[in-house]
């Protein structure tokens, strides 16, 4: 029964995390005007990084939905951690603390997602499902 609770919680938090990542990744990949303006003029980052980071976010979501192996899923979590920490630092450096809070919020969501993933994985291993 515990496994089912962790699975449901994992999927709910994963959907919330996915919405946030897609809301930042899709405009980056499509190089929408407001995304380019923020990335280049506000954050002072080169424009060629914008679609690159967008595609990495989209590709990083795949192992969270379809866990091929534990190691690849762990690398996806690490990639999101680096992305969000870097994104928070860039926003905090260029803007105010309050304007950098949305990125910090998704860092907390990522931590919750990772804890649910590890707890769910540990329970499945104890039962012999993995």
Image: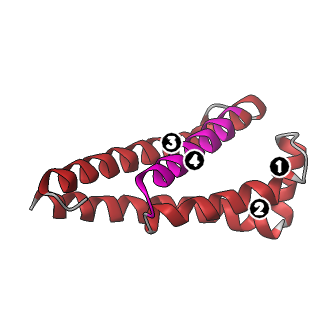
Q: Residues within 10 Å of mark 4 (few under 14, many from 20)?
A: many
Whether residue 73 is in magenta: the answer is yes
Q: Marks 3 and 4, how far apart in space?
A: 9 Å
Q: Marks 1 and 4, how far apart in space?
A: 18 Å
Q: Residues within 10 Å of mark 1 (few under 14, many from 20)?
A: some
**Which x, y percent locates residue 119?**
25, 47
What residue is at 66 percent from the left and 59 percent from the top? 24
Reading the image, the residue beneath label 4 is: 80
Give the structural element (helix, strand or loop) at label 1: helix
Reading the image, the residue beneath label 1 is: 39
Q: Marks 2 and 3, how far apart in space?
A: 19 Å
Give the structural element (helix, strand or loop) at label 4: helix
Residue 28 tag number: 2
Magenta highlight: main SS: helix
- Given residues 88 and 51, the one toward you in this image is 51
Q: Earlier in the sequence, mark 1 or mark 4?
A: 1
What residue is at 82 percent from the left and 50 percent from the top? 38
Looking at the figure, which quarter contains the N terminus?
bottom left
Is 96 on the left or on the right of 32, as rendered?
Answer: left
Q: Residues within 10 Å of mark 2 (few under 14, many from 20)?
A: many
Q: State which region is magenta.
A: 68-89
| Residue placed furthest toward the left | 1
Q: Marks 2 and 1, how far apart in space?
A: 9 Å
Seen in the picture, residue 32 relative to 57 is either above or below; the reply is: below
Please name which of the two marks, 1 or 4, marks the residue nearer to the observer. 4
Reading the image, the residue beneath label 3 is: 107
Q: Marks 3 and 1, how far apart in space?
A: 19 Å
């Amino acid at each position: 029964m515990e496994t089912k609770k962790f699975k449901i919680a994992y999927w709910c938090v994963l959907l919330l995390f996915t919405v946030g990542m897609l809301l930042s990744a899709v405009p980056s990949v499509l190089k929408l005007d407001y995304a380019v303006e923020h990335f280049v003029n506000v954050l002072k980052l080169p424009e060629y990084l914008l679609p690159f980071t967008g595609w990495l976010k989209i590709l990083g979501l795949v192992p969270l939905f379809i866990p091929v192996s534990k190691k690849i899923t762990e690398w996806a979590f690490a990639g999101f951690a680096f992305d969000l920490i870097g994104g928070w630092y860039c926003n905090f450096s260029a803007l105010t603390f309050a304007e950098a809070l949305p990125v910090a919020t998704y860092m907390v969501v990522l931590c919750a997602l990772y804890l649910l993933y590890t707890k769910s994985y540990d329970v499945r291993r104890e039962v012999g499902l993995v």
